[in-house]
Amino acid sequence: MSHHRSVWAVSVALLLTIAFVPVLPVLVAGAPAAPPNGHTAHNVILMIADGAGFNHVEASRMYQFGNAGAQVYTQFPHQYAVSTYPYDTAGYDAGYWSRLDFGYPKLNPTDSAAAGTALATGVKTRIGMIGMAPDWVSELENTVERAELNGKATGVVTSVYLADATPAAFVAHSTSRKNYDSIAQQMLLSSALDLLMGGGHPWFDRDGVALATPNYDLVGGASTWQALEAGSAGADADGDGVADPWTLVQTLAQFRALTTGDTPARVCGIPQVARTLQHDRPGDANAIPFAVPFIQSTPTLQEMALGALNVLDEDPDGFFLMIEGGAVDWASHDNHAGRMIEEMIDFDLTVAAVVAWVEAHSNWHETLLVVTADHETGYLWGPGSDPDWLPLEDRGAAQVPGLTWNHWDHTNSLVPLFARGDAGDALGALADEYDPRRGFYLDNAELGALLLQCVEAPPAPVCTLSVPLVISQAAPMPPSGD
Ligand SMILES: [Zn+2]
């Protein structure tokens, strides 16, 4: 990322130098201005573990690795915390730690609609709102729309139903997250998304068993579903004014086939399950992880993500992809540690697969990967916490760590952020607030604004402007390369 900074520095030097050479003012007028913080990335991948705070990451780490390792993203070069509070609240006061004010994080938490909107649009809004400003009427531009304007391919993947608040915030606009019909119709019938994957299949129950009577509530109604099945649903996705109908993918074999080789141009993947890939399945919800057999007919989040990347990577302008592990939040609302850990592991394995994909098919100069959460759920800490906050107890790999749930809802706790890729250099300047326990942090709206900027077309190559006669001494060119 020093590349962009140095380009900007050179362009400033150029302008200053040129200004002292009266015969060349026309070059100044013609110079494309590089944005002062002109961070862009060819590909931007945002991964959100819904409801995952620092201790959800810790619990998953302990279960997977004991003290012998950690998730791949814990090695990323950019690590900060993120504040998540919604519009028109008192914000986040890091002083609660020193006051031993254990109840503080339960006050004024956000939800996935307001937090998703902040991450997707860079603007804080009210609880429950999807892509709408606090004034109730203004639609906010989201990252998918901005990426589409810049010619990029776009996709959204979730392990819960596709019209749920987090995926919805990246595509739709609605004053209520519960307007499922409208939200699903915006995503399926009017968006320019190239890739959409999530649950909500009308013909299957939460265990993946076929239903006698369909439920179209989460896919935009019966007519939307019938158009999807008929191959006639979908607006213009590539800007040529002609409709680009979705190719509907439903079976496990179809999802797996997407991960290699040629793919349809535009894919909607709805696995054969009612709401979530695995979290909603029947069986003892208090069981240890993986004790209750998984549904065998649904893909993993990892398989969905790899299919999504394979669909999106055809676009020469790059892509934006949001991948959500959506049921970490659901398990945490229920204070079900086993299912929370299952969901975190599904998410963690997906991050690892995305990292491997970037290293095989792209690189960290052109691709930015951000791993974060929209808010914390369950107020998860170690046993004996309150009034002080104690760490989880590591009981070794394949053992649920010692932990306590201190709430059944979201909290106003900071959440973790891990990023890799040159464009992530821009995070440091944003993370200018300090928390005594979590270190430097930025706000979710700041992160959202940065992501919007990252999907812009790259700044014009200012270096090609160089006029050797003018800059030969005043502004030597920087070393080439990234
Ligand atoms: Zn929640």
Image (spheres, rainbow, N blue to C red):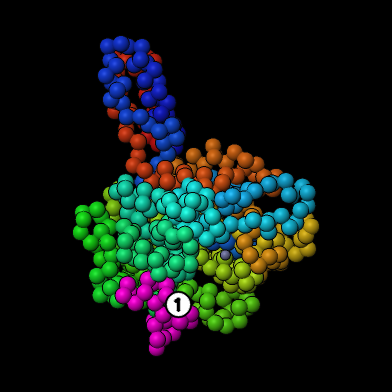
**Residue placed most toward the observer, 411 or 154:** 411
Q: Position of residue 156 (x, y in %)?
A: 40, 60
Q: Is residue 169 magenta?
A: no
Q: Quadrant of ligand 1?
A: bottom right
Residue 197 visible? The answer is: no
Residue 93 visible? The answer is: yes
Query: Assess mark 1: CB under 8 A from ligand 1?
Result: no
The answer to whether residue 397 is left or right of residue 385 is left
Kindly identify the residue that appears in the image at 25 percent across and 71 percent down.
231
Q: Is residue 298 above or below residue 156?
A: below
Q: Is residue 430 above or below residue 323?
A: above
The answer to whether residue 220 is left or right of residue 424 is left
Kindly identify the residue that appears in the image at 48 percent across and 67 percent down.
178
Circle 1 crowding by C-alpha within 10 Å: few under 14, some 14–19, many from 20: many
Q: Is residue 462 above or below residue 91?
A: above
Q: Position of residue 4 (x, y in %)?
A: 41, 34
Q: Position of residue 445 (x, y in %)?
A: 52, 47
**Residue placed most toward the observer, 360 or 15:** 15
The quarter of the picture where the C terminus appears is: top left
Stretch of the chain drawn in magenta? 203-225
The quarter of the picture where the N terminus appears is: top left
* Amino acid marked by disc 1: Ala
**Residue identified by numbered label 1:** 274
Q: Is residue 448 above or below residue 377?
A: above
Question: Residue placed farthest to the bottom in the image?
Answer: 212
Q: Is residue 213 magenta?
A: yes
Q: Quadrant of residue 321?
A: bottom left
